[in-house]
Image: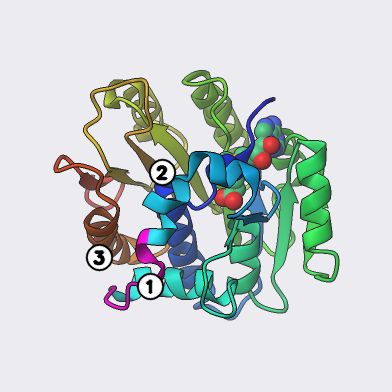
Amino acid sequence: MNYRHAFHAGNFADVFKHAILLALLDALTAKDKPLCYFDTHAGRGEYALDDEEARKTGEWRDGIERLFDNADLPAPLRRYVDAIRACNPGGRLRVYPGSPLLAAHALRENDRLLLCELQPEEAAALRANFRDDRRVHVHARDGYAALHALLPPAEKRGLVLLDPPFEAQEGEFAAIEAALAKAHARWPTGVYAVWYPIKSHRSIAPFHRYMANGPFEKVLVAELLVQPDDSPLRLNGCGMLIANPPWKLDATLTVLLRALADTLAQSSAAATRLRWLRGEKA
Ligand SMILES: C[S@@+](CC[C@H](N)C(=O)[O-])C[C@H]1O[C@@H](n2cnc3c(N)ncnc32)[C@H](O)[C@@H]1O
């Protein structure tokens, strides 16, 4: 396990993922009832952008840096940038919050966060970041196994984010499919969001086929390409597959994706796609 998210924190893929994460959590917290947020691959929670890793790649310069001072953004992207700004008091971009920290900011007093991180150093940092937050439970263990063990949550409402490092490349999809099948058996009404990289569309097609015929009745997919998907050697884009999406999320994502393509494009081939694999308008 070599993956370190510090090299990639705040890049275009994080912007895409976290803007959608906040849209999901905002839709779910529109109802009063408490909910559970389950992050299977949580990372350390926060990343300093002047750390050696972040400086080495500078990936955040084509990600959050492009948006941080942009005052002219539509509401769902504005909401995300405001959340990043709230983590950077003083108005200078210095740290990038990971999914656990953004979720903790978006959630309420009576919501609960279950965070899994397998890498011991990252898990220790995650625990330290949330030492004073009684809503948060950190599990230093395999996120897929924890999902199987801990679902359904007592709240019976909530969101699972699956954001694995894809070190196994396309092999990761088999682990995701197995995890989702088991999760559906235990908690069919949970909302599940799966982030995935796009190098070429061909490599994603089997996963989409599986989900189009899989256990969930509603499956929405949002994708952003910042470059043409014609080179399997680089990250050309990414996607988020959402099973059981909240009502009207597709309308919010339509606005969000357009703004993400406008701000994050790295070539004239930048493009977005939003489609139902199953249910609604499939
Ligand atoms: C893409 S990063 C997560 C980023 C985080 N979700 C965010 O958005 O800020 C993936 C993380 O999963 C961890 N990891 C790798 N395999 C894991 C596993 N089987 N279970 C839990 N965590 C794992 C890695 O150490 C890494 O920190």
Q: Residue at x 28, y 27 (%)?
A: 201
Please name whichever residue, 30 or 270, is drawn nearer the observer in this view of the structure: 270
Q: Quadrant of residue 73?
A: bottom left
Instruction: Name, please, the residue furthest toward the left.
Output: 268
Mark 1 touches mark 2? (CB < 8 Å)? no
Residue 121 at x, y percent in the picture: 81, 41
Q: Quadrant of residue 219?
A: top left
Residue bearing the label numbered 2: 241
- Quarter of the rendered image showing ligand 1: top right
Q: CA distance from mark 3 to mark 1?
A: 19 Å
Disc 1 residue type?
Asp
Helix, strand, or loop for circle 3?
A: helix
Give residue 47's mark.
Answer: none
The N terminus - image quarter: top right
- Is residue 242 something that shows in the picture? no
- 249 sits left or right of 121 in the view: left
Residue bearing the label numbered 1: 69
Helix, strand, or loop for circle 2?
A: strand
Q: CA distance from mark 1 to mark 2?
A: 29 Å
Residue 47 at x, y percent in the picture: 64, 54
Which mark lies nearer to you, 1 or 2? 1
- Is residue 56 something that shows in the picture? yes
Q: Is residue 71 magenta?
A: yes
Q: Which residues are magenta?
A: 66-73
